Image (cartoon, grey):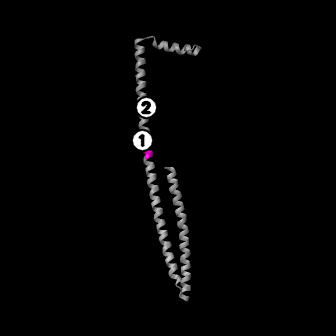
Amino acid sequence: MQTEQQQVERQLDEVRKEIKSEKLEAAKTEAKAALVAKVGSLLGSGRLKELEADNRTLQNEVAIRDESIKLLQQQMQRQQDEHNRQLMELQAKHRREMADKEAEHQKEVSFLKSIIQKAKKWFPLFQELVYMEKFCLKVGFNEG
């Protein structure tokens, strides 16, 4: 997704550079056309019509590039929207899974507490046995 977006951004930058170049070319052509028109009016040249045609062609190309940029920007926006939607879905799924695990953990803790309470009830010395085991481990005895 990231590389695709980066690729689209690179394409967009390239198209922008081309448009700037073509706009400069169009401005240059217009300046030439104006100059030739003045000279042509003096000399009656047919070159003016050719320059005007070139100018129209360049303007059409610029319009096509502008439309291309607009389409690329829309595509980028769609990709960003899709990325955000997927991210939100994953976050929601993660929250649900964590809540399920927490509930399962609480259930297990509750079950173990009930077992310990039953052991204390049935075996009154159970608590002292646990304390004795802890004490023995502290003073150096091992499980064996």
Residue 139 left/right relative to 57: right
Indicate which disc, 1 or 2, sits on the residue closer to the N terminus: 1
The residue singled out by tag 1 in the image is 92
Q: Amino acid at mark 2?
A: Glu
Residue 72 position (above or below residue 62): above
Instruction: Say which quarter of the image contains residue 77.
Output: bottom left
Q: Which residues are magenta?
A: 86-91
Q: Residue placed farthest to the right in the image? A: 140
Q: Percent from the top left, x then y, of residue 47? A: 53, 82
Residue 79 position (above or below residue 31): above
The residue singled out by tag 2 in the image is 102
Residue 99 left/right relative to 14: left
Task: Identify the main secondary structure in magenta.
Answer: helix
Tell me the element at label 2.
helix
Residue under the image location 57 percent in, 16 percent down: 138
Q: Amino acid at mark 1?
A: Ala
Instruction: Say which mark, if any, is on residue 27.
Output: none
Q: Is residue 87 magenta?
A: yes
Q: Nearer the viewer, residue 125 or 85?
A: 85
Residue under the image location 43 percent in, 38 percent down: 95
Q: Percent from the top left, x then y, of residue 49? A: 50, 81
As measured in the structure, the alpha-carbon distance from the residue carrying label 1 to the one carrying label 2 is 15 Å
Residue 7 position (above or below residue 39): above
- Label 1 neighbour load within 10 Å: few <14, some 14-19, many 20+: few
Residue under the image location 56 percent in, 75 percent down: 28
